[in-house]
Image (cartoon, rainbow, N blue to C red):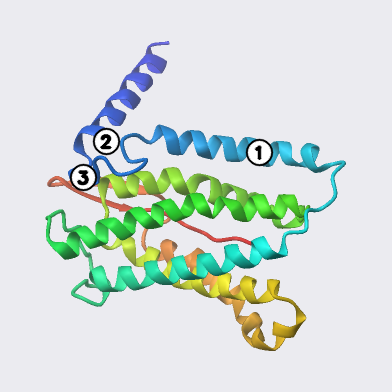
Amino acid sequence: MAEHDNFITKAIKGYDYVLENGDPRVDGWFLMSSPMPSFIICMAYFIFVLMSPTFMKNRKPVKMKPVLIFYNFSMVALSGYMFYEFLMAGWLTGYSLGCQPVDYSNSPKAKRMARVSWLFFMSKFIELLDTVFFIMRKKFNQVSFLHVFHHGILPVSWWFGVKLVPGGFGTFHSMINSWIHFMMYMYYGLSALGPAFQKYLWWKKYMTTLQLVSTCTPMCDIPIHNISIHNKQIHSIPIHTYTV
């Protein structure tokens, strides 16, 4: 019982520490005041996935070609924009492939990196629609454990990333991930347009390689959402794996 109480006390202290020592630049940004809204959304996502076979059992697959075309090309635009912003906020303007620390200043470039880190975090909620569309079309073979697990934990994981470290080397994976998503959603968008566009999908054979790159990139850094504190510098590298 004492150990249980000690664990709860430590958890509360850790939660308070995060809220008190987060980057003040993100205070007031949408969903950044507390991790609870992100956690609740993710829990609702898991519940929806668990209940979906029962919900769709006696229903026909939903035809949603126009929706898929709009969604995929919207994600192409968003992913392309984030990739550009990660480049211009640091990776083409002074960032190093070494141990790149977070710039917590209020310089225009540092704030630009914080903003695109937050936008990347928000995009993880939008990507939950990938699963929703699979389920509505009864493509349950696409709703694998890894797909659900990674889509479901990323919003919460990235909340801590943006709250504590909106910049630095952790954004390298985000930059690469944005480019890979740009290519993936372009592929899915063209596929949704129909057979007439199949000739533009000659690079289909490279899709698996892109997914493997997306999976392995964070493993080259730290294979877990790791937070370490040294001289008040917090380093955090979240994982993101895109599985379709």
Disc 2: which residue: 18
The residue sitting at 26% across, 51% down in the picture is 165
Residue 187 is at least partly visible in this image: yes
Looking at the rendering, in which quadrant would you find the N terminus? top left
Extreme residue in the top direction: 1
Residue in the image at 21% along x and 45% along y: 23
Amino acid on which the number 2 mark rests in the picture: Val
Q: Which mark is residue 23?
A: 3
* Amino acid residing under circle 1: Phe
Please state which of residues 70 and 109 is positioned toward the viewer in this rendering.
70
Q: Find residue 7 and report its image quarter.
A: top left
On screen, residue 239 versus residue 184, left or right, reads: left
Give the Cα separation between the discs numbered 3 and 2. Answer: 9 Å
Residue 187 or 161: which is nearer the viewer? 187
Q: Residues within 10 Å of mark 3 (few under 14, many from 20)?
A: some
Residue located beneath label 1 in the image? 48
The residue depicted at 24 percent of the width and 68 percent of the height is 89
Q: Position of residue 58 (x, y in %)?
A: 87, 41
Q: Is residue 183 above or below residue 232?
A: below
